[in-house]
Image (cartoon, rainbow, N blue to C red):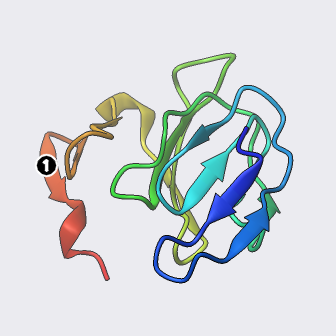
Amino acid sequence: MHAEIVNALTGERRTAPAWRAPTSCSITWCVSRDRVGRRDGTSMRTMPNWQHNAPALDRFLLFSSPKSSRFHLLADLATGVTTDLHPDDSPSLDHLATTLTYRKVIVDLTAID
C-alpha cells in the first residue's frame, strides 16, 4: 500500500511492509483481511477474517461476521483487548467520530485510556 514511510521531523525513511489488498489504514494502524499491525510493520497479529472499517480514533475496530450479522467483536488495537458484543443490540461504530452505539447507549470512546 505505502512503499516508504518518512518521518517528517527527522527525515528518516523506512520501507513500509507489504499489505495485501484490501487494506485500510489509520494514522498508526493498518488492517487487511486477516491481520493488523502498525504502519511500520511492528505489532503484527492475525485478526478474524470478518468485515470491518478503518480504525476509529486510530485504535478501535468493530468486526461483523461475513456470514451473519449476528456476531460482532470490538477490538482495541492499542491494548490488544477484544470483546464480544451482543448481536441483538445492533452495535455500530462511527469511525469518523468518537462513539460506539450499543445497547441503546452511546459509549464515549475517548474516555478509554
At 28% across and 75% down in the image, what residue appears?
Answer: 112
Give the number of marks: 1
At 13% across and 49% down in the image, what residue appears?
Answer: 106
**Is 29 rendered above or below residue 88?**
below
Measured from the top left, where is residue 93 in percent x and y? Answer: 32, 39
**Is 61 rendered above or below residue 70?**
below
Task: Identify the residue position indicated by label 1 in the image.
Answer: 106
| Amino acid type, mark 1 | Ile
State which quadrant residue 2 falls in. top right
Farthest residue in the front direction? 11
At 46% across and 48% down in the image, what residue appears?
Answer: 55
The answer to whether one can see residue 39 in this image is no
Measured from the top left, where is residue 111 in percent x and y? Answer: 19, 74
- Packing grade of label 1 (10 A; few <14, some 14-19, many >=20) is some
- Report the quarter where the C terminus lies: bottom left
Measured from the top left, where is residue 70 in percent x and y? Answer: 52, 25
At 79% across and 41% down in the image, what residue appears?
Answer: 34
Measured from the top left, where is residue 13 in percent x and y? Answer: 71, 69
State which quadrant residue 21 falls in. top right
Most foreground residue, 21 or 102:
21
Most foreground residue, 55 or 86:
55
Q: Is residue 23 left or right of residue 81?
A: right
The answer to whether one can see residue 50 in this image is yes
**Is 49 rendered above or below residue 30?**
above
Most foreground residue, 59 or 24:
24
State which quadrant residue 33 falls in. top right
Say what secondary structure mark 1 lies in.
strand
Most foreground residue, 26 or 10:
10
